Image (cartoon, grey):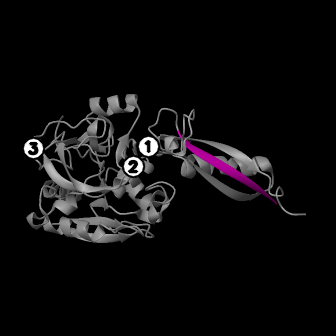
Amino acid sequence: MSEFRFAVNVLPKDGILDPQGRAVEGSLGHLGVEGVSGVRVGRRVELTVEAATEVEARATVERLAGELFANPLIESYAIEWVDIHAGVAG
Amino acid sequence: MTRVGVVVFPGSNCDRDTLRGLELVGAEAVPLWHEQGSLDGVAAVVLPGGFAYGDYLRAGVIARFSPVMRAVSAFAGEGGLVLGICNGFQVLAEAGLVPGALLRNRGLRFLGRDVRISAQRFDTPFTALIGDSRPLRMPIAHGEGCYFADEATLDGLESDGQVLFRYVDADGRLAGTEADAANPNGSMRAIAGVMNARGNVAGLMPHPERASDRLLGSDDGLPILRSLVEAAARADQRGASAAQPVLVGAR
């Protein structure tokens, strides 16, 4: 068995009202920033899965993403593989 | 006496009010702990308001996977009566037992205030004793109460009579669909409550149990609880195993 680490990025679907994104976008003027649009606020879930293969691990993450991390009615998600060893001081 | 169960999740905070409200309308109200896998033979289940499992991830989603919810899903599948109030509505929506989802309030603020709602049908187990479309005054207390479904689903809910309650103003005029004073969370088509296609599972954001005594400022919530308890009593008489259609009359 090996360990695989993934991140699931969840965002409100296109066209779904995102009051948080709108509030963040509305605040940008106070920072003196112009020309920024389309702000969407979501969440990111990182997790480690123990499995024989990456395909198997990814299938588990796919299931969790669709059933738990995101509500498919209102949110979309993208799964990202995270390199466990990156950033570890050698 | 008809037994009605009130589910207690870690973080539920309206369970006692709901138990008392059900007792006021003649039920034997019993708490059902979230870790139990059976419903103790109740004739109806209420999922109360609160912040089940801290509302972590999304309101209602973690509660959905609790042992008691597996039993509630099976009960609903057999035609059992289930009512979700506020957080309970969010749990039902996450579990797919009622259509749609509850989004963050359009104004982003948590809202604790009185609203008025009007029943859209009077032939359901949840509304049969309301009698007319007069505005019912009761509180809301939620951060995620903006009802959402896609346009096709909304059209289907309307044509199939699954919209149970809508936000109205004090004079009974339908609230706007953008957030306004009468529809403060900005629910689509001013929807405050819906039910499933079979008509045995319903959810609403306002709190009937907090409007169960005139001392609380309103007892407009009682007819909703009474409707449920009377429908549960009829279901009880038919026998728990007989999965009959539960609609009170033809549309």
x then y, percent, for residue A46: 67, 56
Of labels 2 and 3, earlier in sequence is 2
* Label 1 chain ID: A
* Label 2 chain ID: B
Query: Which secondary structure type mostly characterizes the magenta part of the structure?
Result: strand
Provide the secondary structure element on which disc 3 rests: loop
Q: Quadrant of residue B26?
A: bottom left
Q: Is residue B116 left or right of residue B95?
A: left
Q: Residues at badges 2 and 1 in contact (C-beta under 8 Å)?
A: yes
Q: What amino acid is labelled 1 in the image?
A: Pro
Q: Label 2 belongs to which residue?
A: B108
B163 or A19: which is nearer to us? A19
Q: Is residue B28 left or right of residue A25?
A: left
Callouts 2 and 3 in the same chain: yes
x then y, percent, for residue B65: 49, 59
Callouts 2 and 1 in the same chain: no
